[in-house]
Amino acid sequence: MHRFFNIFMGSCFFTAQLFLLTHSNECEAKPQASIALYGKTKHQDGLTHYAHVNPNAPKGGKVNLSVSGTFDSLNPFVIKGVPAAGLTPLYPALFYVTLMDHSSHEHFSQYAYLAETIDLAEDHLSVTFRLRQDATFHDGSAITAEDVVFSFNTLRSEGSPLYAQYYGDVIKAEAIDQYQVKFSFKDATNKELPLLLGHFPIFSKSYYLKNKFSDASTKIPLGNGPYRITDVDAGRSITYERVKNWWGEKLPVSKGRYNFDQVRYIYFRDPEVAFEAFKSHNYDFRVENKIKNWVLNYDFDAVKDGKVRKVETPFVQAGIMQGLVMNTRREIFSDARIRRALALAFDFNWLNDNYFYNKYERIDSYFWGLELASSGLPSEAERALLEPFKDQVPADLFTTPYTLPKNDGSGQNRQALRQAKALLKEAGWDVVEGVLKNTKTGKVFQFDLLLSNMSMTGMLNAYLKNLKRLGIQAKFRVVDTAQYTSRVEDFDYDMIMMVMAQSPSPGNEQREFWGSYVADSKGSRNYAGVKDPVVDALVEKLIDAADHETIVTVVKALDRVLLWGHYVVPLWGSSKLRMAHWNNLKNTEKFPRYNIDLFAWWAD
């Protein structure tokens, strides 16, 4: 998930971190080395290094990692092409740096990275970053405020549409001098903007005066992070080499991290081939998402001999919604009753018994795993927020808890299928000679479930069989990664399987997920095509929320409206992280709560 956070108005107090304050004559904003979303940062007296790292970890060695699919581009910031791994400035950043770095122990704290300090104006109408004067690109040229301004403006004008949405409330970016950059806001209501601005990639202006930014090619660009690209084998592998004497190596956010001399991502199109490659030590580290492998298939000699280690650790999910997304731009999915019927047909209990060894849980919220997830009936505060929209949302939202069918695991979910059949009939569809047809037009109810590989077809086949019992003709359509990516960006699908991860402090990015204004914008993440004025209104209330309590209330209300919109068939999730690694990799075993941070590991 992208890391974007909200900021709330805190108390009138500053220490080593920056608190975001309501206007007061008794305190003045001043440049700080860190920023906290709620109260104090964990390292309020100054960060020396993150808690999960070994500050004396040895440098050297290599690590091979696996990636599914393929790639044909080294530009992940435009909607063209399929980008290679390691290029986005999400935690951790290998190739490009950002102004601030996000702690994987704290959802709501950021620490100085490329920016030496951050200074939020008292009126909250601007924020100023001062850059480190020794920071350079890989060619030795200095990173300046002009590069930051260029990067920001280019992302908004030529990058993926999400950047224009995230930074829509910024009216101007300007270089005050060679190392200071100031961002001005259209008003003071968007509380998360200072943190959002800490997390976009910084490019070289002079490089892109000679090279077209919007190109999606495998030409190696100019970076500024701890690693440079040394080899590209399009669709097969990409190799990074640690930059010796990198300018950011001794920073607190970097200490004990970025230890491998070489990082290589190897691509596999087939998940089974990838697993066999791990067993043969063709790569070193694996997050195991297939529970059958975890339970049955880690019995090879390297595990028995202690050369491969299995690790299962509690992991805080970042508001995961994994589901089958219905494209409401398609006429057959335009009716919420139909979408609800399709959700009823999914028998999770049978799958959990027969495929998952009862190790998964049913997802029942778009913010599953977080305090933001709704449950039961709306609270008094939620009701007060939703009451003005009572004529625009289902009446059941106020009186009936949102639930998913719980079956006995026998695979005979007759009661849920009867409910589904009744909803379909109410929506104008009836079974004629075993086939579901529209009672007015005679149109057959049929659709494709678009997938990028075959790995999920076995599990989801049971779902298609249940749909067939309803007379629905559904089938899998499996395409290669490049075609899948292109079709998703163009909304050229009936149904897709998608994982949507949410921040524990949602904000601006919710426009990109659900906003009516991006529903038809190519490349947006409004995969379902949600166009609901109530959702739009709640998203804006969320962005304007001034404190944590209000954020929780608004998000729970938003969650309820989305759930009762029945845009997805919710699938499954786990509150544990399962990973395996060869013993040439070492770590402190102090795993962060919110991120693996493999680049805090080192080679033996």
Image (cartoon, grey):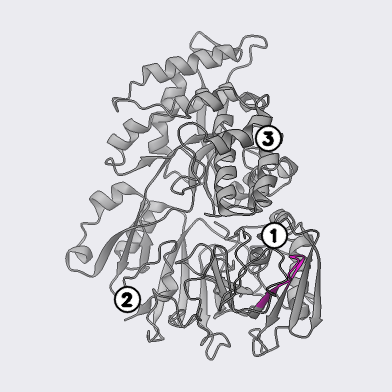
Q: Position of residue 433 (x, y in %)?
A: 50, 8
Residue with the mark numbered 1: 78
- For the N terminus, which image quadrant? bottom right
- The answer to if 122 sits in the magenta stretch is yes
Residue 346: which quarter of the image? top left
Q: Residue at x 55, y 76 (%)?
A: 231
Looking at the rendered structure, the secondary structure element under dot 2 is strand
Q: Is residue 445 visible?
A: yes
Q: In front of the other: label 1 or label 3?
A: 3
Q: Nearer the viewer, residue 268 or 582?
A: 582
- For the C terminus, which image quadrant? bottom left
Q: Are marks 3 and 2 in contact (CB under 8 Å)?
A: no
Looking at the rendered structure, the secondary structure element under dot 1 is loop
Give amino acid for label 1.
Answer: Val
Segment tinted magenta in the rendering: 118-127
Residue 288: which quarter of the image? bottom left
When the figure is inspected, residue 6 is found, relative to residue 136, above or below; the finding is above
Q: Residue at x 64, y 90 (%)?
A: 134
Asked whether, in this view, residue 135 is left or right of residue 298, the answer is right
Q: Give whichever of discs 1 and 3 has the lower sequence position.
A: 1
Q: Position of residue 106 (x, y in %)?
A: 48, 65
